[in-house]
Image (cartoon, rainbow, N blue to C red):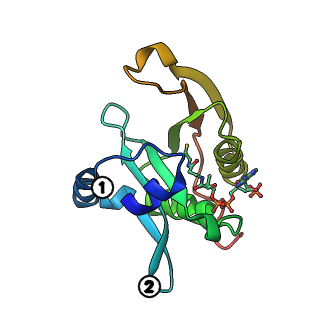
Amino acid sequence: MWRVARDSQVLDVNPSYAYLLWCRDFAETSAVARLGDDVVGFVSGYLRPSTPETVVVWQIAVDEQARGRGVAGALLDNLVERLDGRANRLETTITADNVASQRMFAALARRLGCTLDRSPLFVDDLFPDQHDAEDLYRIGPWQTPPMNGAK
Ligand SMILES: CC(C)(COP(=O)(O)OP(=O)(O)OC[C@H]1O[C@@H](n2cnc3c(N)ncnc32)[C@H](O)[C@@H]1OP(=O)(O)O)[C@@H](O)C(=O)NCCC(=O)NCCS
């Protein structure tokens, strides 16, 4: 996951320790995608403590050579399906220039048959370093995931 995040050249690269700790404590809301023996993508998330029916996607990335084949969509569908009955909303933050990510979450909202709202969350002044503003995207609530077998 650390390697995929680093190679994406888009995501913030957290220390490798953070990914290890994440997988220890948030495995049920995280997943990797494999091509053969190689990890080519991952999603990391958590159930929001104050609203635990909301899964927050912290990071998602797919290696460049595996993009455009539905890997990220499958990671998100799998996450939603695994949380069936527990989470019925999803949140994430996206920068204004990340069109691929915006389309990816818009496509997820369509598959789930629910709305997607965008609002400002972390404006750039809040960051102590150089960082673009992050908008909050909220999907849901959805009913039982309709995508089982539908893709
Ligand atoms: C965003 C990312 C994870 C998408 O991975 P992917 O496996 O190629 O995505 P998928 O093939 O599952 O596509 C999912 C949807 O997003 C759309 N999409 C994906 N990449 C796109 C792009 N570059 N431009 C426009 N739409 C795109 C697809 O068309 C698809 O929508 P559809 O079902 O309506 O056709 C990948 O481009 C990536 O790793 N980017 C760098 C890291 C990043 O930006 N992460 C998100 C941070 S918020």
Residue 122 lies left or right of residue 119; in this view the side is left
Q: Secondary structure at mark 2?
A: loop
Residue 62 location, quadrant? bottom right
Q: Amino acid at mark 2?
A: Asp
Q: Earlier in the sequence, mark 1 or mark 2?
A: 1
**How many angstroms separate mark 1 from mark 2 (CA)?**
19 Å
Report crowding for label 2: few under 14, some 14 to 19, many 20 or more residues within 10 A (C-alpha). few
The reply to whether residue 41 is in sight is yes
Q: Name the quadrant containing residue 69.
A: bottom right
Does residue 29 appear to the left or right of 125 in the view shown?
Answer: left
Q: Is residue 146 above or below residue 15?
A: below
> In the rendered image of this protein, does residue 89 appear above or below residue 137?
below
Identify the residue at horizontal 60%, vertical 22% (top origin): 119
Up/down of 86 relative to 20, above or below: above
Q: Closer to the camera, 77 or 125?
A: 125
The circle drawn on residue 37 is: 2
Percent across and percent down for residue 127 are 41, 21
Q: Which residue is mark 1?
A: 19
How far across and how far down the image is residue 36, in percent?
50, 86
Callout 1 touching callout 2 (CB < 8 Å): no
Picture coordinates of residue 18, whole percent (x, y): 26, 50
Residue at image location 38% in from the left, 56% down from the top:
29
Which quadrant is home to the N terminus? bottom left
